[in-house]
Image (tube, coloured by chain):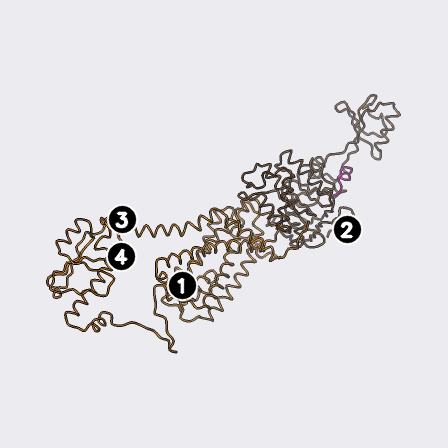
Amino acid sequence: MRIRGRSFLGLIALVAKRDYVRTVRRRGFLVGTLMLPLGIGVFMLLSTILPGAASPGMGTGFPVGSPDATGQVVLLANESELELEQPASPLRFELLTREDGLQRLRAGTAEEFYVIPQGYPDDPTVLRIGEPSSGFDVAALQRQAAQQQGLTLLLQATLLDDAAVPPELAERIVAPYTLQTETMAGQPGPAGPSIASFLVPFAFTMLFVISIFITSGYLLQSVTEEKENRVVEILLSSVPALPLMAGKILGLGAAGLTQVIFWVISALAALSLLGNGGGLDGVSIAPITIVLGLVYFALGYLGYGAIFSAVGALAPGSREAQQYAGFFGFFAVVPVIFSSLFVSDIGSPIVTILALFPFTTPAAMLLILTLAPEIPWALVLASVVSLGAFTALATVASARVFRATLLLYGVRPSAGAIAGAIFARS
Amino acid sequence: MTDQRAATGGSRADGDVSAARVEGVWKSFGRTDVVQDLSFEVRRGEVLGFLGPNGAGKTTTMRMILDIIRPDRGAITVFGGPPGIEHQTRVGYLPEERGLYRDVPILETLTYFGALRGLSTREARDRATHLLTEVGLGEAMKKKAAELSRGMHQKAQVVATVLHEPDLLIVDEPFQGLDPVNGEMLRSVLLAQRDRGAAVVMSTHDMTDAQKLCDRILLIDRGRRLLYGRVPEIQRAFSDGAVEVRGAGISAADGRYRSVSEAAEVDGSVRFLLRAGASAQQLFRELADEGADVERFEVSTPTLNEIFIRTVAGDRRAEAVR
């Protein structure tokens, strides 16, 4: 029989691999990984379908007066003297009389129709006739907003034509300009702020926070389970506490990341299936921002992982472990709570404090990196040093607490005992 | 300061023979001194019985040898070096509180434990398969621990301890909770390990097990060493000079035999207490001279259980074998 020499890193890899494989093979992990995107997909599908299902026009083909998949039809009774001009719009207008419109409503083949009054344009009151929807019907609101935008274009085009404005000028009046941006160096600039450019930093930060919580869940589950199963003493007699803890953090962290990455890929795939890249077209993140983001992600991950390992070792049971972990996990969310401040005043002292306080550094810096017009290198340097030192200290201290308290079955160690374990001579 | 003689239980310390050595070790938890100036040595090819009442400091001492916790003072060496990552592959441990991963097949758990102890995954799996089959768990090795009986658990845990053929085996209250069949299996496993040259440290408070298995014993109470040495030597030290004789023509009358100070009839035998300086052989000769027909002549030696109780109660004879 050959006994191999074991290195510190070899042991970390062994524990990490084993914990990773064991976790990702668990039924709970597989169900959780697959069910979340599936559940959100089903929810989105239902939220799209259900408002339509509740409408009386369902089952009679595409209800007239509703935006639909083939080109949206707007029912319009024109009682004015104007001859309507079809504008360049995805909407199609079907002209009818007020009586026909009411008949269609009664028959349930339309949701609403519009009436342009006899005195138009002197009387600008356009009438929308239809039954009010019950409850908060998002689909109806979206449909009506699209109809009214189309109606505006129709009336603008008609009035301009009536005033004998040349078509090119009429087009310019309706759409007076297209915006293009340029940097001082003459390079094409960003198209301007979009919803996505605000959402991406938050998504990035939330991804970090979610990963922290997911991984902490796996770490706590693993440590408390080994404690409750009484396997831990065999492990600690086989492997020093530090590589055991580090292996767990890396292995279970990788399992948590696997889950998050799967969810992100699923979300991106779903967005691209919905069309136009889910509104992420034109959003670009500089490579250096990604590199720095990964640094904060990794350091924050290791720091929190070390703390959660110690929490798992300290807690007498899994329920207490979850409660203690929630206290530390709250810090990860604090920058998200202050996110409006990051958007409105990124130079605020509170933002700087959050960037330098190690518990909030990762989330705060991820927000700063994606929101700031330029990378604040001094803050980056200071926060990396502070977070790096904190992570190193947290790892060593947690390994000591891990070793000293993991074998206290069903006992909650005193604060003095914890401090004693941290500051004991090695 | 503890001298080397004390540390080695009266024998010469030999670096090649010693598997682990504990010298002047102290350990406190809060204000309680759990281990106080403890010294002893574990040698290869022996079973050292680590005896003591509950809370005596046995488990704490074992955990210090295993480097799970560190002593406050004193020194511990394992195979000549500090305990830790260097020597963990040569150590096997069966803790008092033991378990297996409930939702994992036992073969997988044992393979992992073997890999942690330095075996390649393949070798750990092969060894675990072989040993599990040997102890009658061949059919169950792919079952999860939660599906196994308590007895099967116990067998699997013993296999996990010796999977990598450790040179130092530390077993904490190994017979606690074992059924008789598994108890016998464990006994034979421990003796087999000793016979192949491994050092075995066995903590127990069951003196019958200790008497059957141990070559030497170390008795501690409140973290202090009370007895340390070979079992016959300790029994001799605690022998009260009593001899029990059964047969015909044996008298319990006072002054009948010169070598006897007291005599009493007990359950059909006569129990003689020898005078200071007198020997059992001298009494035997006197009985023969008197024409007694001796059926049974037994020098009474106290059991480890009696020694344990007397020592913990403060019997001064313990000082001779401390």
The tag on residue A378 is none
Q: Nearer the viewer, mark 1 or mark 2?
A: 1
Q: Which residue is mark 4?
A: A70
In this view, the residue farthest toward the top is B248
B225 or A13: nearer the eye?
A13
* For residue A382, side relative to residue A125 (left or right): right
Q: Which chain is brown?
A: B
In the rendered structure, does residue A231 fall within the stretch colored magenta? no
Q: Which residue is mark 2?
A: B14
Could you tell me which chain the residue with mark 4 belongs to? A
Q: Which residue is mark 1?
A: A201
Which stretch is magenta? B228-236
* For residue A147, side relative to residue A374 (left or right): left
| Residue B116 appearing in the image | yes
Determine contact: label 2, label 4, CB under 8 Å: no
Q: Position of residue A44 (x, y in %)?
A: 34, 52
B153 or A1: nearer the eye?
A1
Query: What is the C-alpha distance between the residues marked 4 and 3?
Result: 18 Å
